[in-house]
Image: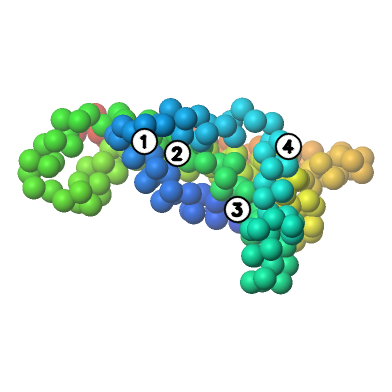
């Protein structure tokens, strides 16, 4: 069992989930209720990582983060090493390929809140921030939880983008999915099977908790 790869994957998944939470809340809420020119194109761009092959997305991210790119040169001037093939680069790539999993479920959750509820809150004199905290956030919570679980599980099992952007550097970019691939390539099928089972158990547990929590919250709102 490659414990360092598992811990790195959990660290990457948790960091991606926490960093995308405010982004998903802001963008999902804005897309749910605002109408503007080019909205359909923006939604299509956000959904693009869902249909693009991971290696294609990873290739473009590698070009954007490489040592010859403006972003890569700027990062190297600050930290002395390239953004690609580092944990920071892996985290940035993880946030980009998880954008649809963060924004789209939250957008649907905010869209499910009827305008009458928001209108009543405004008539009561509630500020926008209080309206968000006291009304919108609790009502959208099941969708928010679903988004967070999707981000966590997807990051945990991502292979193509991680391999293209991070490679397989032990303790730095070798995630559990990459480690499984390396073990299979070395014909260490027993070790690969153990790690695959652990990854399956973690993902199944996370998704099951998401469904259970979502049903509990929905039943609570129904009783209220």
Residue indicated by mark 3? 92
Which residue is farthest left? 124
Crowd tier of the residue under label 4, counting other residues whose Cα lies within 10 Å: few below 14, some 14–19, many 20 or above: some
Tag 2, which secondary structure? Answer: helix
Q: Can residue 150 be seen in this snapshot?
A: yes
Does the CB distance between marks 1 and 2 fall below 8 Å?
yes
Horizontal placement of 60 versus 132: left or right? right
Q: Earlier in the sequence, mark 1 or mark 3?
A: 1
Tag 1, which secondary structure? Answer: helix
* Mark 4 → mark 3, Cα distance in angstroms: 16 Å
Residue indicated by mark 4? 55
Residue indicated by mark 2? 103
Image coords of residue 143 (percent x, y):
39, 36
Does the CB distance between marks 4 and 3 fall below 8 Å?
no
Residue at point 60%, 53% (across, down) = 92
- Nearer to us of marks 1 and 2 is 1
* Mark 2 → mark 4, Cα distance in angstroms: 22 Å
């Amino acid at each position: 069992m490659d414990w360092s790869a598992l811990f790195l994957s959990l660290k990457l998944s948790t960091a991606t989930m926490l960093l995308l939470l405010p982004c998903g809340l802001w963008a999902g809420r804005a897309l749910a209720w605002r109408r503007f020119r080019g909205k359909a194109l923006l939604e299509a761009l956000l959904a693009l990582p869902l249909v693009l092959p991971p290696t294609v997305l990873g290739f473009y991210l590698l070009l954007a983060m490489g040592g010859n790119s403006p972003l890569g040169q700027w990062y190297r001037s600050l930290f002395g090493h390239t953004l690609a093939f580092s944990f920071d680069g892996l985290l940035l790539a993880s946030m980009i390929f998880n954008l649809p999993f963060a924004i789209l479920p939250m957008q649907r959750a905010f869209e499910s809140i009827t305008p009458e509820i928001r209108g009543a809150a405004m008539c009561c004199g509630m500020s926008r921030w209080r309206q968000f905290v006291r009304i919108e956030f609790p009502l959208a919570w099941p969708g928010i939880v679903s988004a967070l679980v999707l981000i966590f599980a997807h990051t945990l099992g991502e292979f193509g983008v991680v391999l293209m952007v991070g490679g397989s550097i032990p303790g730095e970019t070798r995630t559990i999915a990459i480690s499984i691939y390396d073990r299979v390539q070395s014909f260490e099928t027993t070790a690969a099977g153990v790690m695959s089972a652990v990854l399956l158990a973690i993902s199944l547990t996370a998704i099951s908790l998401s469904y259970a929590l979502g049903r509990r919250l929905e039943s609570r709102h129904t009783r209220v």
